[in-house]
Image (tube, grey):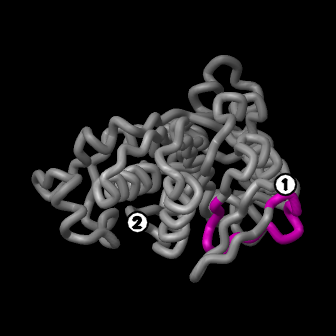
Amino acid sequence: MTKEEFVLLRDYVYEKSGIHFAENKAYLLESRLSNRLTELGFSNFEDYYYFLKYGGDKVRSEIINLFNAVTTNETSFFRNPPQLDAFKVIVHKCYLQNGIPSMPIRIWCAACSTGEEPYTLVMILLEMMENLKKNIPFSVFGTDISTKALESAKKAHYNMYSIRNMGESIRQKYFVEKDGSFILKENVKKYVKIDFMNLMDTNAYKMYKQMDFIFCRNVLIYFDEKMKKKVIDSLYESLKLRGYLTIGHAESLHNISRAFKPLIFPGTIAYQKG
């Protein structure tokens, strides 16, 4: 990939997805798109770019392949326990302490990847129901830009690496092991609605309003400052008043937004819509 080809494709990826590849990540973009050249029979990246730019109706399906190629889907069940502990504390204190909420708790995982995060939250809530002997009404939405990841999320078949942070009792309770694969039971899957969403698409946020919780973890690191502010502003609008936003452990809203109130929990920070 020449420098000129990198700039063309980097800008195109950014325009369509908001994902930003810095110049020192040119090798990464080249690596991730090489298979697309092979698949389509192009001899160089410039031809691939012009196909994306001027390929007509065929481009729509190729953009989906492009998104699948450039996204990172590293995740696992019960990832970052301090953030999940904070979620449990907030649910108990703000939604259950004074009885059962009259409206379902609405939770949106805005970059759900292969589904581990939304399914983890369901299992947490199911465990809370059992322990408290209360029926907590809730609904969970999982969206992502990678259709390949979403297909895996809907299938909900996982390997040992995905469940490495999970206790044995939880695994046996919510999964069926078959041929080395761990298949999530329907009593967890049924709570999660999985769908495609591009966080660049302002209109798509209309589908996800009045959320009590939004998880958008380890996404901001792939955006530049302009895109970070755009996404955070949109997520803010999608939250209920006093709703909660959780971002990645290594991410921060510093210099991005002052609209949220940071809440300190052991080992983590949650952000509340004030």
The label number, if any, that marks residue 254 in the structure image: none
Contact check, label 2 and label 1, Cβ < 8 Å: no
5 with respect to 75 (left or right): right
Q: Secondary structure at mark 2?
A: loop
Q: CA distance from mark 2 to mark 1?
A: 28 Å
Q: Residues within 10 Å of mark 1 (few under 14, many from 20)?
A: some
Q: Is residue 12 visible?
A: yes
Q: Quadrant of residue 197?
A: top right
231 with respect to 136 (left or right): right
Q: Residues within 10 Å of mark 2 (few under 14, many from 20)?
A: many
Residue closer to the observer: 47 or 188 = 188
What residue is drawn where x is 58% and y is 52%? 71
Estimate the x, y position of residue 194 in percent, counting from the top left: 47, 36
Estimate the x, y position of residue 224 in percent, counting from the top left: 81, 60
The residues colored magenta run 246-260
Residue closer to the observer: 234 or 151 = 234
Estimate the x, y position of residue 106 in percent, counting from the top left: 56, 41
142 with respect to 167 (left or right): right
253 within the magenta span = yes
Q: Magenta: predominant secondary structure element?
A: loop
Q: Which residue is mark 1?
A: 229
What residue is drawn where x is 34% and y is 35%? 190
Q: Which residue is mark 2?
A: 78
Q: Residue furthest top?
A: 57
Q: Which is more N-terminal, label 1 or label 2?
A: 2
What residue is drawn where x is 11% and y is 51%? 178
Q: Secondary structure at mark 1?
A: helix
Placement of 121 over or under 54, stated as above or below = below
Q: Label 1 amino acid?
A: Lys
Q: Is residue 33 visible?
A: no
- The mark total stands at 2
Estimate the x, y position of residue 128 in percent, counting from the top left: 37, 58
